[in-house]
Amino acid sequence: MNTALLLQNIGNHVRLEPAEADLLLSLFQPKVLKRKAFLLRQGEVCRSENFIVKGCVKVYSLDENGFEHILMFGIEGWWVGDLLSFLTGRESRYHIEALEDTELLQITKPDLDELYERVPKMERFFRILLQNAFIAHMERIDQSLSLDAAGRYAQFIRKYPAFGQRIPQKQIAAYLGMTPVFLSMLRKKSMAG
Amino acid sequence: MNTALLLQNIGNHVRLEPAEADLLLSLFQPKVLKRKAFLLRQGEVCRSENFIVKGCVKVYSLDENGFEHILMFGIEGWWVGDLLSFLTGRESRYHIEALEDTELLQITKPDLDELYERVPKMERFFRILLQNAFIAHMERIDQSLSLDAAGRYAQFIRKYPAFGQRIPQKQIAAYLGMTPVFLSMLRKKSMAG
DNA sequence: CGAAAAAATTAAAGTAGTTGAAGAAATCAG
DNA sequence: CTGATTTCTTCAACTACTTTAATTTTTTCG
């Protein structure tokens, strides 16, 4: 599996010695998911943090009517998991499912703790990761409060142009908080206007 | 100013030696805000992380129509700021304004960096803080996707019963993403039902 | 490739939430 | 304490978005 992408991702924020990089890689396990396979199911405990080497996943909850609400997508170079479950050992509320055949590198909590012990600067790396995720979530909340459906779609396409191509509209609607029918109507309108 | 609350808040997550606690307190500055005074304005750089000793603030953005969208409230024992601006030095998109007369303890970025150097376990403390904030935001996004206005209000009251007493309905509406008029109508209906 | 499943489009009817306006109640500042 | 300001309530008209359902287009995978 392509471990270079992981090292490059980490290298964006902290500088690792070769020996540290070797140690780090030894603590990650590769995992392959077929399209529609689950990395995590609601009710399970999330036992790993997961770096996406290839492919695409969605993190979502299911409400009592069986509707999906997508919290995030992840593609190559992104990290996914359920942090609350991972850290506390509680059951996750979320499903994580592959939208395409996907390759991951996984690290378990004991191994991550060992990594923090032996390569303390990795604590900094994960703090930065978390900061970025936090900021992205804050912006998303702001947008969900300030923008109507058309505005949220426009922002989404501007911010993640690649996703527009790659992810079915139905899923994008479940991420943006609108029905696929309405999204289709918006797109038609914006073509015309 | 009541510094015990800050030490207690930190003590929930990391154990400090007396000397470390003294050093830490020496790096925080007290600040007092009158009701309606600003801790931060849109366009300014957020120069401090702020621990609320007493009082209540709101973090909000203003849209082009002049409507407020509240990202979070903060009361005694909470931390507020604009992390993106604080970390990157970019201009903030948010206002932070006191809803009541408020007392804060502030730490600047240089002083926080010094604190990390001299008391490394504080890096862990802020990571935990960030994790909790991240998880709370994730839950809020999930709710904004899954719940209608009535459900969001019910959840808010359940999760933050104190806020229901203390914060004007108008502001709660701006936090929950609905109009004050509609919130008033919901409340009337739920009294009856 | 070809049959079957999933996704996208369109249209019409329905509903949750908004807007504007006006009076009543609560809170604030001098 | 009092006048001024802000907040809350109520109502009726309006609109952004949903729902249902039928048809077409695209994608999947054996």
Image (cartoon, coloured by chain):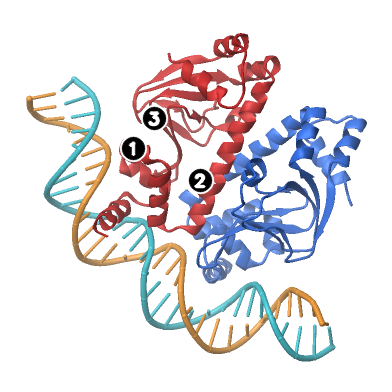
Chain colours: A blue, B red, C cyan, D orange
Say if residue B89 shows up in the picture.
no
Q: Are marks 3 and 1 on the same chain?
A: yes
Q: Which mark is residue B167?
A: 1
> Relative to residue B99, is residue B144 drawn left or right?
right
The type of residue carrying mark 2 is Asp
Residue topped by disc 3:
B56
**Chain letter for the residue marked with disc 3 in the picture:** B
Residue placed at 55% from the left, 19% from the top?
B107
In this rendering, which labeled residue sits more in front, label 1 or label 2?
1
Percent x, y of residue D12: 20, 65
Residue B173: % across, % down: 36, 47
- Contact check, label 1 and label 2, Cβ < 8 Å: no
Name the quadrant containing residue C27. top left
* Residue visible at 51% across and 32% down in the picture: B43
Q: Circle 3 sits in a helix, a strand or a loop, which is it?
A: strand
Spatial CA distance of label 3 from label 2 is 20 Å
Viewer can see residue B162: yes
Residue A53: image location, x then y, percent: 81, 51
The relative height of residue D12 versus residue A16 in the rendered view (above or below) is below
Q: State which chain disc 2 sits on.
A: A
